[in-house]
Amino acid sequence: KSVKTAESLAYLAGIIDGEGSICFTKSNRPDGVYYTVFLTVKMTDKTVTNWLQESFGGNIYENAATDVQEETCSWRVSRREVLSSVLKGVLPYLKTKKLPALITLEFCEKFPVGGVKRTEEALAEMDKYYEFMKVANARGPGSASWRRGSPRISAPAPGRRCSGGRPTRGQ
């Protein structure tokens, strides 16, 4: 991998803040419950996603065009040691994704290996991180999920406007 300069880490942080997602998934399988944590960036510019993979590792996935979206390319990092390294590098530069990054770093430190059976106690602790991440990634007033009526948050009082001047629900 290339040398990670402050400039490249700041650039990556901007990409993550703008186009990235730091996520947890929970899978209920016949042999137990498993949690996956990952960072993904989805873009139409393959030059950028290829640079991300060359510079920081991870995998590239191509997504076919649809009627409403052009072809995209996703860069994804899910190996916990690589994910931790990337997030530690960009943490000083993150703005909107700082809390999800901190949650993920703590999770990866406590549970450095994925895909293994866990005790009930460990699963309960992992589930707390999973639930906390859902709150950290919830979108507030003015977001697309809020305008669609997301039940995660309540609307301001009728007649009030959200930041950015967008009308609240019911207007």
Image: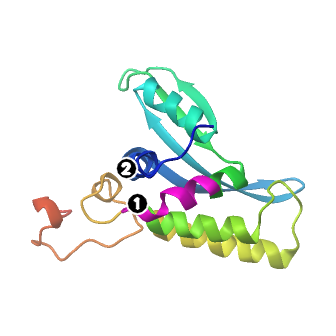
Q: Residues within 10 Å of mark 2 (few under 14, many from 20)?
A: some
The answer to whether one can see residue 167 in this image is no
Residue found at x 56% / y 37% = 55
- Mark 2 or 1 closer to N-term? 2
Q: Quadrant of residue 72?
A: top left
Viewer-closest of 25 and 45? 45
Q: Quadrant of residue 84?
A: bottom right
User: Mainly helix, strand or loop, the magenta region?
Assistant: helix
Viewer-closest of 117 and 113? 113
Image location of residue 11, percent across then percent down: 39, 46
Q: How is the rendered protein coloured?
A: rainbow
Tag 1 secondary structure: helix
Left or right, 29 with reference to 128: right
Quadrant of the snapshot with the C terminus: bottom left
**Picture layout, residue 160 above or below residue 47:** below
Which amino acid lies under the numbered mark 1 shown in the image of this protein? Answer: Tyr
Residue found at x 43% / y 61% = 97
Structural distance between the alpha carbons of marks 2 and 1: 8 Å
